[in-house]
Image (cartoon, rainbow, N blue to C red):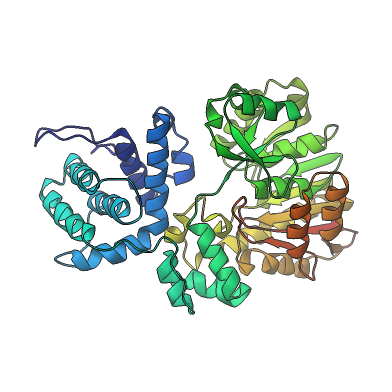
Amino acid sequence: MSARPSGSGSRGSFTISAARREAFAILLEVERGSGHSDDLMRGARVSALSLPDRHLCTALVMGTLRWQIRLDALIRPLLAKPNARLDPEVQIALRLGALQLLFLDRIPAHAAIGESVALAKAAGHTFAAGMVNAVLRRLAGQPKPEAAPEYGLTPAAIAEASAHPLWMVERWVADYGFETACRICSHGQEQPQLALRLNFAELEAELVAGGIQLEPGSLLASARQVVAGDVTATEAFRDGRVRIMDEGSQVIAELAGCGERILDCCAAPGGKTLVLAERNPEAEITACEVNPARLDALRQRIADTHDAKLQAQLQFVEADAAKLAPEPVYDLVLADVPCSGTGTLGRNPEIRHRLRFEDLSRQAERQRAILGAALRILKPGGRALYSTCSLEPEENAEVVEAVLGDLTGFRRVSLAGRVRELLSQGRLTGAGVETLLAGIAADGSLTLIPGRSHDGFFAAVLERSGGRV
């Protein structure tokens, strides 16, 4: 069965808009675990849509994933058998229709219901189409949820209002407090601002002349937030002179600092590698990646820059960062490790549906192995920056604590000094330095809570002085 339903079929004539057809296909892939929404939304078929259809497709995919828990809670009581298992195609058709009826403005009810029924039919579920029609018509008669719901006074109330798993909310309330937990959940329900990295003033002028409306970044002087316009259609984007990159990711690479021999030990997709190269133009940089397809994509990304100096500066190694030979040859290592991604729920909302509590200990085991390997390849005096886009202590402070307990000859270095250094170099905004300094803990590590213009992340710097490893 095709993941993308056609616009007509032998069981009757019907029309499905391009935006809804692609949204249905992407959600089905996400539901089956065969793709991530962020990657799928950048695919060729979505890129081929008209700009209005692309915007609608994005709103449908991301909105459905963000509100899925709430949508299912509204749909289930209206089923003849509320606990019955629905086929994925039927479930997605119901969610798409419910989202449009209850959470999106300016979409006529007949369009939301009619095309959801057509999607179910086109996916081969003709007999379920009547049920989809009946459930959505009943939903259409219900009042819309509040646009900005009150989160209530308990983790359960926050979880229900913000469509987050209760276990996640309970942890955030315990770790960060009620107010911050509400901020995290609010971020998870919003479309993050698209951020760019601009290294030259003339690039901004070129983009503005091309109809791109920009605002200054909230953290970095070199960052811009896209207010309006299609950056991907510009020549500057196509030839790699401007890059889409979350401000949080840019900050991580800026915090890493300088060195003569640098290793980016989990390098793909390469955004941080490029920042390291910009800030260390004379350094020898090795980009390490365990996944051969992702490493090939990174190689191609560098080749597409047509920058001979950059290509000569970078080396590519296919290797598991947790199993690097313990030879102390690097003076700077960036260990931006794979993680749960709970700091990126606005950008990757399906994480809340896939992640389980027990996954955190599995992630932490690999993270400890990568950080330990990163420290063992440092020269005396060399530094490693360990980072995640997670908000979970098991993946952050507890990983650093465990590795330092296993190894001797390493010390923590507060990130406050590096933040002030970046400020003195004109790389941070005034608001940015305040935000970053406020996030630095007593042990010198940094936790950034997700915001409108950036994801959440954790970072810590460790320095090698010598001793047994």
Residue 36 visible from this viewpoint:
no
The residue closer to the viewer here, 394 or 437, is 437
The percent coordinates of residue 34 (x first, y second) are 40, 45
Query: Residue placed at 87% from the left, 50% from the top?
Result: 421
Query: Residue placed at 79% from the left, 69% from the top?
Result: 443
Placement of 242 over or under 94, stated as above or below: above
- The C terminus, quarter of image: bottom right
The percent coordinates of residue 341 (x first, y second) are 56, 56
Placement of 10 over or under 309, stated as above or below: below
Placement of 420 over or under 266, stated as above or below: below
- From the viewer's perspective, tell me whether residue 391 is left or right of residue 378: left
**Residue 461 appears in which quarter of the rendering?**
bottom right
The percent coordinates of residue 18 (x first, y second) are 31, 33
**Residue 388 appears in which quarter of the rendering?**
bottom right
The percent coordinates of residue 54 (x first, y second) are 41, 35
Residue 383 visible from this viewpoint:
yes
- From the viewer's perspective, tell me whether residue 303 is left or right of residue 2: right
